[in-house]
Amino acid sequence: MSNKEYKISVLSGDGIGPEVMAEAIRIIDKVSSDFNVDFIIDEQLVGGIAIDETSSPLPDQTLNSCEHSDAILFGSVGGPKWESLPPDTQPERGALLPLRKHFGLFANLRPSICFPSLTNASPIRADLVEGGFDVLCVRELTGGIYFGEPKEIQNHGDERVAIDTMVYKESEIERIACVAFEAAMGRNKRVTSIDKANVLRNGILWRETVEKVSSKYPEVELDHLYVDNAAMQLIRRPREFDVLLAPNLFGDILSDEMAMIAGSLGMLASSSLGQSLGNGLYFGMYEPSGGSAPDIAGQGIANPCAQILSASLMLRYSFGLTDAANAIDLAVRNTIDAGYRTGDIFTNEEGTHRVNTTEMGDAILSNL
Ligand code: NAD
């Protein structure tokens, strides 16, 4: 019987993107041989390097490759060289936003993982993060106040008035809630839904719709928090959360708060999911939470873990290769537990040693 085959558009981009992507590809190759699946890797230009070579941050050929792929593995884009270009033609605005829009990527999933052996990277009190934590932030990405109309600044007599409109359709809430509950089923079966139902009509509809979806997942425990309280509780007791479900604006803020609480940007992966493929799988784009890190680019010292964990999310959410994804996550965890540290997470703690990008990749590969 022939192996199952998946096509991946690999868009490494700028700065540390290609350096960390090289390590993720080595991991994917190993998974391919260990788990008898074939990955067809199609590397394409994106971001600043694409501007340099084709004048566009998202060339047609790249978009075409993505359209014919099962998932997109994204590195990072941008850097000082392109910062003076008009905003819409800059690498991030000109590539990331159009990709999200083109593929209707409505769900942003960001695991905020603080490994037990990396708790000293967290800026919050040691006793609150002892033993580490693993919270999955599920943020609605294409609706809410960022996109609602009208969105304008009006002239009212002699002063200006800014208007942003928060709009959510029941169907939009329903589909993001389903993503959160599906994800919770594969984790600790707890969803905390975030809203502001005490003030916003949006919050009332959000809460009612999430309740309705929850009835389809009787095994998953659901609770609700107002966003202001959530901002406090995440700092006070991060270990008690499993899946956090939030509308666009609140999710934007809380997922950054969670990233900060976890402590190390170079460890944090992210996924943006679009069309459901059935069986809890989605077309998606997978990328590290950090950017192109121009301050360390070209030195071979970037942390490849976020990119490798992004590849793991791709195997989990787009290909349904749960065993392979678990194996990668465990290999990263074991490598960190064994004391391997790139510069961004190195604190000179006893039993740890500083490694470069390739050495970290080597260690993860040997633990896989
Ligand atoms: P950044 O995330 O690139 O860097 C912030 C800090 O984190 C830097 O000190 C950097 O060295 C460090 N860092 C980030 N990832 C790391 C890793 N894997 N290993 C070790 N250290 C890491 O954010 P920034 O400096 O604000 O932005 C730099 C450029 O990246 C800008 O052009 C920005 O527009 C772009 N950017 C791109 C994306 C994306 O492609 N999705 C996201 C954010 C920023």
Image (cartoon, grey):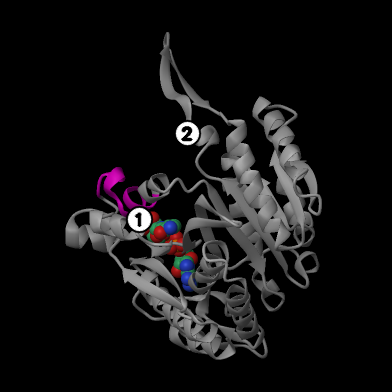
| Magenta portion: prevailing SS class | helix
Q: Residue at x 75, y 44 (%)?
A: 214
Residue 198 to residue 239: above or below:
above
Could you say which disc has been placed on residue 309 in the image?
A: none
- SS class of the residue under badge 2? loop
Query: For the residue with label 1, is its CB less than 8 Å from the closest atom of ligand 1?
Result: no
Q: Residue at x 70, y 72 (%)?
A: 119
Residue 21 to residue 357: above or below:
above
Magenta residue span: 85-96
Query: For the residue with label 2, is its CB less than 8 Å from the closest atom of ligand 1?
Result: no
Q: Is residue 94 magenta?
A: yes
Ligand 1 quarter of the rendering: bottom left
Q: Residue furthest front?
A: 1
The residue that label 2 is drawn on is 147
Left or right: where 252 falls relative to 201: left
Q: Nearer the viewer, residue 79 or 149?
A: 149
Q: Nearer the viewer, mark 2 or mark 1?
A: 1
Q: Residue at x 37, y 73 (%)?
A: 40
Percent coordinates x, y for residue 367 in the rendering: 59, 88
The residue that label 1 is drawn on is 67
Q: Is residue 326 magenta?
A: no
